[in-house]
Amino acid sequence: MVFEKDLNLDATELRLGLPGSSKESLRISNKRALPDMNDDSGVAAAKKCDQETAPPTKAQVVGWPPIRSYRKNSLQTKKTEAETSGMYVKVSMDGAPYLRKIDLKVYKGYPELFKALEDMFKFKVGKYSEREGYNGSEFVPTYEDKDGDWMLAGDVPWEMFINACKRLRIVRGSEARGLGCVV
Amino acid sequence: MNMNYFPDEVVEHVFDFITSHKDRNSVSLVCKSWYKIERYSRQRVFIGNCYSITPQRLIARFPGLKSLTLKGKPHFADFNLVPHDWGGFVYPWIKALAKSRIGLEELRLKRMVVSDDSLELLSKSFPNFKSLVLVSCEGFTTDGVAAIAANCRFLRELDLQENEVEDHRGHWLSCFPESCTSLVSLNFACLKGEINLASLERLVARSPNLKSLRLNRVVPLDTLQKLLMRAPQLVDLGIGSYVDDPSSEVFSKLKAVIQLCNSIRSLSGFLEVAPCCMSAIYPICENLTFLNLSYAPGLQGNDLTKLVQHCRKLQRLWILDCIGDKGLGVVASTCKELQELRVFPSDPFDAENAAVTEEGLVLISAGCPKLNSLLYFCHQMTNAALITVAKNCTNFIRFRLCILDPVKADPVTNQPLDEGFGAIVRSNKSLKRLSLSGLLTDQVFLYIGMYAKKLEMLSIAFAGDSNKGMLYVLNGCKKLRKLEIRDCPFGDVALLQDMGKYETMRSLWMSSCEVTLGACKTLAKKMPSLNVEIINESEKLESEQLEFSFDDRLLVDKMYLYRTLVGDRKDAPEYVWLL
């Protein structure tokens, strides 16, 4: 049709749709090729798909598979959590008759960890300062790191700590002096 | 014999026994007298599309209204196909009800936009308000929830299911006054933030009627143990965090208290879970009728299988596909009472690890004769399997199959899955809801039109070859109420063939099909009882407008039409065109 040629309808994709969406692949005979729909990252990626001659990798089609966003979001956060299984470490306390084991992944930071230890062993951690370590308490939390060194718990960022910590030991304050600095 | 000789009160008393919405609607159509009696005595109203009627007309017709159920956005909004501010706002409803003399006691909303203001207004306007159920809603924060807790003095039910709620670090739970002792059901599993655990314990302690409690993931195991001590009468439990050292004292206490909870029939949650702790749950498994582990990806196939072996009385099971085909085999041999099965994908985008296939489904169909409702996400399906399932199960009311690769053929024969689905509809004469997937031609729609005579809701994606497909369905499925179609080659011819059909349906959704703007305009013009909405989110639109000024040949990306008694809605955003 002359009219169509003039307006060049195909090239301008005369549709009220999201930019980049293409219907071409849906019309290939009976056997429908994997739909070349826009993925979550939008136009650029869709164009990239058009240019590649290799079969499109599983471009994520909007709204497919049909799972509620709420469920999708929960699974995504939990997948990353579930992948790294629990980080159980032994905890000993000077003077206590037996050791305990805790999962470091359960805690979000030092305050929660120390609270849990305090509850478990019935002691108080005391106030932390960078310069002096833990003041005002009989007991101090220390840990053995991957190098086999005994460190004062609380100095390094939490994420670094849980990855480095192999076991925990709650020592009497008197023994802890001298453990203040690392470097 | 003529009921018109009975005084109104007698007729009304008879109507008290008629509880289903459908039946009450039918009763109201018999004659003017019955219409009048029915409307004054009606207490519960269900509105499947909030735009089909206005709150004012609802209030005028049913002055005795106590319980209202409203649904807003179309179903495909669940899958991000509808923009967030498309509509479905509850505020105008609450405002109108608050102004009236309606003594609202129960409000149930699905897929609606709920603001904190609405919740606050709701909480302050109805002194007898008892029950709030929000499913897949959005737009509110924990401040709104706090208003409900603080102001609804006789609250029995606060049920938040799968809502997107912004957490405002307020202590909504602590807003329940000490005088609130009426709670029967509390579900806050979808809230992400911290709560005051001590407040929760006190609340449960002063709620002797509490039967249903679903916790969120910040509630740790030791709090769970304390809560169960206070509420051993629970019937429905949703566990938040279930992580502890099995050798700990707390865990022993939990094991002991669980033995006392012999009323629990429904179990869900395990939002955070240590598999080694699951053995404590076994004693309650014996009596469970509903088990939902679909939010517990921390449990592997083995853990799930071990647990399920104890659940002989299970009627409904929601689970992740990591249970595997073998695990489903265990379900099939253990759960002989099973009626409903939902298998969700633990990794929706992973094609590598095929967790469940057609084999699992076949095992279930062979082992569970009472199966009537299925939602099954899998990596592949064969015609042979579906035909076997159709032979084994003839009681399906709901059959939803989702093959993760949208156009996958039968991997054994390379054929479309027309015959398989055809067998399903042929042998399941009571089928009301069907979702299709996989490679499908017009043939499957021929079968659906021929056999699915009771079908009310049909969901189609990436299927069919031509307009014939859609026409088979529209012509054959006399009971069809909701039809939703995406990415199918159905166009104007199918859309316009029988325009009157849409007046017998609640709604039609078509996206990424081949319907033109012109056809939508024609439909809208010829059918004033329908609202025809076009959703355009295109950035290109403005330049297109300049060049083509709404050419009727434009293919429409998203069309949603629904029957209504009240014409165009006034709250549509800019990008929604009401034709």
Image: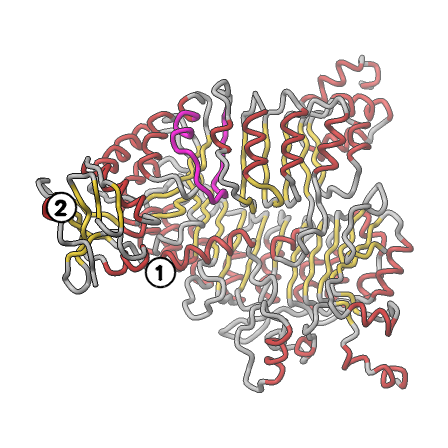
Q: In which quarter of the image is residue A123?
A: top left
Residue ID at (39%, 50%): B331
In percent of width and height, residue A108 lies at 35, 49
Task: Name the amino acid type tagged 1.
Answer: Glu
Residue tagged 1: A83
Q: Is residue B236 above or below residue A170?
A: above
Q: Nearer the viewer, residue A15 or B461?
A: A15
* Residue at image location 27% in from the left, 60% down from the top: A163
Most foreground residue, B469 or B205: B205
Magenta segment boundaries in residue numbering: B183-203
Mark 1 or mark 2: which comes first in sequence? 1
Which residue is identified by label 2? A171
Name the outermost residue toward the front. A131
Q: Considering the numbered disc 1 on the image, is that residue within a helix, a strand or a loop?
A: helix
B456 over B55 or under it: above or below: below
Q: Can residue B47 be seen in this view?
A: yes
